[in-house]
Image: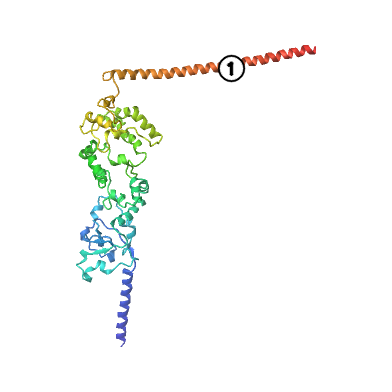
Amino acid sequence: MKQFRLLVFLLVGSAMLGWSLFNTTYSQPVLAQEPTPTVPAVEAVFNPHVTNDCLGCHSNPDMVGQFPDGKTMSLYYDASLHEDSSHPQGCRACHDAQKEYPHNADSGTESCEACHAQVFGGDGQNTTVFEINAYIDQRAVSMEINKSCQKCHDENFTETTDSEHSRILARGNRYAPICLDCHGSHDITSPNEPRTKIAEICSKCHTSVYTTYESSVHGAALESESNPDVPTCDNCHGSHKVTGPADANFRADSITLCGNCHADKDLMSKYGISTNVFQTYLDDFHGRTVDFFRQTRDTRITKATCYDCHGIHNIQAPDNELSSVYPANLQQTCQQCHPDAGITFPQAWLSHYSPTWDDTPLLYAVTTFYKFFVPTLIGGFLVYIALDARRRVADKLRKRSLKLKAVVSETNNTGKHDEKAQG
């Protein structure tokens, strides 16, 4: 009898201990562990209940999640993508909402069947489909994870809030570019390596613009030799604080964008381009007017800027027949602002060359004359004004001196008269 009671006691004690261990293991959420990139994803054999390792589940290539509308997204993580990434941080650095395991433990939607479909008559673990109820679609997942970028990149993240992309996002377009769209997620690398990557990133949304740029003199040099000197999208539009034609100051500021390269003598000398191209523009009527409005931050600019004549994304070399400033096309280009421009109208333009005695003797003579005449005229006026001012001052001082002498003389005469009267 005593042996029977002892056996019953041991069985009950073992059952209670097992139940306690079960509740401790499965009922309490724990932090998901970071994946170990050195472990091949497809060979992961960990039990996630024991290791709490993210790869215990997410190394399954057939693992997918299903949103309320029936659309799905892959939940597979390829650890090899992180090998060349510039972000070695683990999963929890970005996946704030998935820090605890099981995920969404308080939602009441977790079920054994989610992982163990075969026990419930499914086709096996490789066909597991997880229900995702916390997000309406994959874009919602990306937008939440995107907020994590601010933790490490606050300055760049803040700049994006004043970009054209953010304004589009604020108007309700959920597919306006966010950090993940340009930089990627698990495979984040430098956006400037190779340099062609910048334009390729932008081409995901701006396909037609990219096609035009690719065939331009700048784009062709970038594509063929990854030339570090030619401008790409971010040089003109910015990277995080993206601006475009919709920005009030973009038109006026465009001349400084072009000047960043075309006013650089060292850079232009590498390609046999004179900086006069930019300087002569600033010296003529168009350039002086635009630059004046730019400095005063006045957006009412109607005069031609660089891209009005040379094109925007389709800029070609001047000797290219497709160029808008090619001699045969120049009249049509001028007619954009001067509808009545005749065939001889473009001949008044010096093509960014300074006048010389050999090419334009009359204009050179007039220009030279005014270079001496205007300073001489202004200098003469200044000398005249200075002499006139000196004379006026001298006259005032002389009159004041004479007046003072008269007062003194009158005072002396009055004194002498008083002395005689007393005598």
Q: Is residue 380 left or right of residue 142?
A: right
Q: Against 262, is 68 above or below?
A: below
Closest to the observer, 295 or 79: 295
Question: Crowdedness of circle 1 by 10 Å Cα count: few (<14), some, many (20+)?
Answer: few
Residue 356 in percent (x, y) is at 28, 20
In the rendered image, which quarter contains the N terminus? bottom left
Residue 42 in percent (x, y) is at 20, 59
Q: Is residue 194 visible?
A: no
In the rendered image, which quarter contains the C terminus? top right
The kind of secondary structure element at disc 1 is: helix
Q: Is residue 131 visible?
A: yes
Image quadrant assignment for residue 263: top left
Q: Against 171, is 315 above or below?
A: above
- Residue on which the image places disc 1: 397
Which residue appears at 39% of the width and 32% of the height? 292
Residue 218 in percent (x, y) is at 24, 37
- Mark 1 residue type: Leu
Colouring chosen for the image of the structure: rainbow
Give the residue at the far right of this rendering.
423
Closest to the observer, 31 or 329: 329
Image quadrant assignment for residue 348: top left
Residue 382 in percent (x, y) is at 46, 19
Which residue appears at 23% of the width and 40% of the height? 212
